């Protein structure tokens, strides 16, 4: 008996000495836990009883923050395996654990991750409900954006109305005006993609940000054109405050006219867009828009015009390349001069 106790004590000692530095409760050596269980159990116990105690020792579950991350990781494994129902069940447990956290910053981070994972599991309404509870406005905005993008990837236009209505309601609670505008822009674009053009315009009207509003209106104009509502598309395009986005919207409309075989109207719109593009101060944007418009001329069977616009874009691009090379050379000379 003495020799057995001595042997078991020797096994348990390393376990005790390492416990002070261990960070992960699940990293206990299996042999050490078994030895500890045996020390606390009378030797005359049956093997069945010992097995039961051993199972209890190994059924240890992390608590607090560790529990949240462990459950979130497990849900991620289920998602990778395509087991969305098990993922959703695991996320429900993770959500409950996260809501009990005392630190708002960590809670926001955890809930943001859980909300995104709900969206990946195609539990979109639940994802929005979790996002609504996120205390940090930036994390809430980030989660909302992720959820909306996950939904868009799934391509469920039939349910888009209910989902986007709820997303809009959650977005209204975002305190940061810039982030709110960003989410409104994304929602407006998704409404347009779901063929709910009027609702898209209503949301776009709420966007408090010139660039983001212009981006949304450009996409909406393009969707109107895709639906062959050309006049409405042109009306929306004319309201865009950014010349770049207006030119891009007109380019999309011209493309749809060309697809419908209405080359004459397409050419007239492209010419208008070219004038706008030439006035752009940002040379990089100018090159990009002109190249798109050259493609539109080509689609409208205007090969000569297409070649002219391509040449114009290439000339500007060559100038930009020379400027870049010169600036790099000057920087290199400056660095060499320091030595």
Image: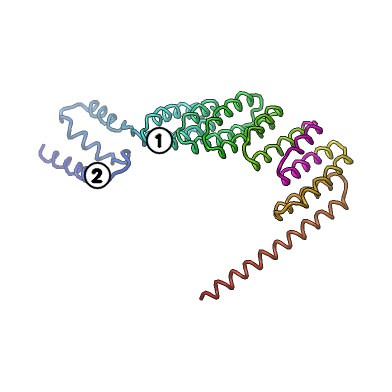
Camera-side residue: 22 or 330? 330
Side (left or right) of 252 relative to 155: right
Q: Position of residue 155 (x, y in %)?
A: 64, 31
Whether residue 168 sits left or right of residue 61 in the image: it is: right
Residue 76 showing in the rendered view = no
Span of residues in magenta: 227-255
Is residue 242 shown in magenta?
Answer: yes
Tags 1 and 2 touching, CB below 8 Å:
no
Q: Residue at x 78, y 48 (%)?
A: 276
Residue 137 location (% of width, % of height): 49, 36
Residue at 49%, 37% (x, y): give it: 139
**Front residue of 316 and 76:** 316
Q: Which circle marks residue 20 in the picture?
A: 2
Q: Is residue 260 visible?
A: yes
- Residue 146 higher or lower than 318, as above or below: above
Say which of marks 1 and 2 sits in front.
1
Q: Is residue 179 left or right of residue 20?
A: right
The answer to whether residue 6 is magenta is no
- State the residue position of label 1: 104
Q: Is residue 81 above or below residue 294?
A: above
Seen at 25% across and 37% down, the residue is 33
């Amino acid at each position: 008996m003495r020799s057995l106790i001595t042997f078991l004590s020797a096994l348990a000692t390393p376990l005790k000495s390492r416990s002070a530095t261990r960070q992960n409760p699940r990293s206990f050596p299996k042999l050490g836990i078994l030895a500890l269980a045996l020390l606390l159990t009378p030797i005359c116990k049956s093997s069945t009883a010992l097995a039961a105690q051993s199972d209890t020792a190994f059924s240890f579950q992390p608590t607090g923050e560790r529990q949240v991350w462990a459950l979130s990781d497990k849900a991620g494994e289920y998602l990778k395996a395509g087991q969305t129902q098990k993922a959703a069940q695991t996320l429900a447990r993770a959500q409950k654990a996260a809501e009990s956290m005392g630190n708002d910053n960590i809670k926001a981070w955890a809930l943001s991750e859980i909300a995104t994972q709900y969206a990946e599991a195609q539990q979109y309404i639940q994802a929005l409900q979790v996002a609504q509870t996120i205390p940090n406005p930036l994390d809430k905005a980030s989660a909302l954006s992720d959820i909306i993008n996950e939904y868009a990837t799934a391509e469920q236009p039939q349910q888009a109305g209910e989902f986007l209505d709820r997303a809009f309601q959650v977005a209204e609670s975002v305190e940061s005006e810039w982030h709110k505008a960003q989410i409104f822009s994304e929602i407006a674009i998704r409404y347009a993609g779901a063929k709910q053009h009027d609702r898209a315009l209503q949301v776009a009207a709420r966007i408090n940000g010139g660039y983001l509003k212009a981006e949304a209106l450009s996409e909406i104009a393009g969707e109107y054109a895709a639906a062959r509502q050309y006049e409405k598309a042109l009306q929306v395009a004319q309201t865009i405050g950014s010349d770049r986005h207006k030119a891009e919207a007109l380019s999309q409309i011209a493309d749809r006219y060309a697809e419908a075989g209405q080359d004459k109207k397409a050419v007239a719109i492209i010419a208008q867009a070219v004038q706008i593009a030439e006035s752009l101060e940002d040379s990089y944007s100018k090159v990009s828009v002109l190249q798109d418009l050259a493609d539109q001329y080509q689609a409208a069977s205007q090969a000569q015009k297409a070649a002219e616009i391509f040449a114009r874009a290439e000339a500007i691009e060559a100038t930009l390349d020379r400027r870049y090379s010169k600036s790099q050379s000057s920087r290199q000379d400056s660095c060499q001069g320091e030595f």
